[in-house]
Amino acid sequence: MKVILTGATGMVGEGVLLECLKHPDVEKVLMVNRKPFALRHPKLEECVVPDFMDLSAVSDRLAGYDACFYCAGVSSVGMKEAEYSHITYDVTTHFASVLQPLNPGMVFDYVSGAQTDSLEQGRVMWARVKGRTENALMKMAFRGVYCFRPGAMKPVEGQKNIKGYLKAIGALYPVLNALFPKHVSTLSEVGLAMINSVLNGYPKQVLEVVDIKVLAKA
């Protein structure tokens, strides 16, 4: 398969990217980044786009792909709803709307988050916005749309983009997984589940941690 991946400069995107590069069924990965990412691999190409709301100059490079793993995103900490909505909802749905007619057989995988609000009515701002984004994506005419809601994640071996508390999760993962199996997974499982969503599909469009673990083994 050929994959478009966003968010490679972040922790989740980097982990999913590394899993894609070592997977035998992934032939090519096109990173679409806002800034260059210092990683080279025979399977890997990079497309630097400073503004994801303007893809006109690179649209010819975005055709001919089987999947998009949309891992880009920002923390809502310190942000007002309008600003967070623009980055999380407007930019994501615009990116998807450009890809869909170029790749009508594409599977679009979106990294959302645990406790996302599908009803879009809760008190937690980021959860409402993520829920609105999920709902909009699932209405688009892709071959498949899957919304991934990972919890705490153990980083992939070789990752460089790891925050301090995630290093602790990596060290404590066996204990955390034994105590809270529905709330923790590895980033390797997230990447494998995304790949398998393209190869095998899944009966649910919204994947919680338990579903991610199941699909990773499919």
Image: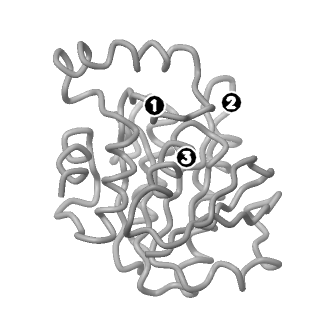
Question: In terms of depth relative to the viewer, which is nearer, 207 or 191?
Answer: 191
Please provide percent x and percent y for residue 192: 33, 53
Q: Is residue 164 above or below residue 127?
A: above
Q: Which image quarter is the N terminus in?
A: bottom left
Label 1 – label 2 distance at C-alpha: 26 Å
User: What is the distance, in whole Å, between disc 3 and disc 1 at their CAs?
Assistant: 11 Å
Q: Is residue 95 above or below residue 86?
A: below
The spot of residue 129 in percent (x, y) is: 51, 45
Dot 1 or dot 2: first in sequence order is 2
Q: Identify the residue at horizontal 72%, vertical 85% (top origin).
A: 60
In primary-sequence order, the first of circles 3 and 1 is: 3
> What is the x, y in percent for residue 25?
37, 69
Residue at the disc numbered 3: 13
Label 3 vs label 2: CA separation? 22 Å
User: Residue, x 62% and y 49% (percent of image)?
Assistant: 7
Q: Which mark is residue 155?
A: 1
Residue 77 appears left or right of 68: right
The kind of residue on which mark 3 rests is Gly
- Numbered badge on residue 104: none
* Element marked by disc 1: loop
Q: Which comes before the other along the chain, label 3 or label 2?
A: 3
- Residue 92 appears in which quarter of the rendering? bottom right
Can you tell which of label 3 and label 1 is closer to the viewer? 1
**Is residue 185 depicted above or below 118 in this figure?**
above
Q: Which residue is mark 2?
A: 79
Within 10 angstroms of label 3, few (less than 14), some, or many (20 or more) residues? Answer: many
| Mark 3–mark 1 CB contact (< 8 Å) | no
Q: Could you classify mark 2 by the number of other residues whose Cα lies within 10 Å: few (under 14), some (14-19), or many (20 or more)?
A: few
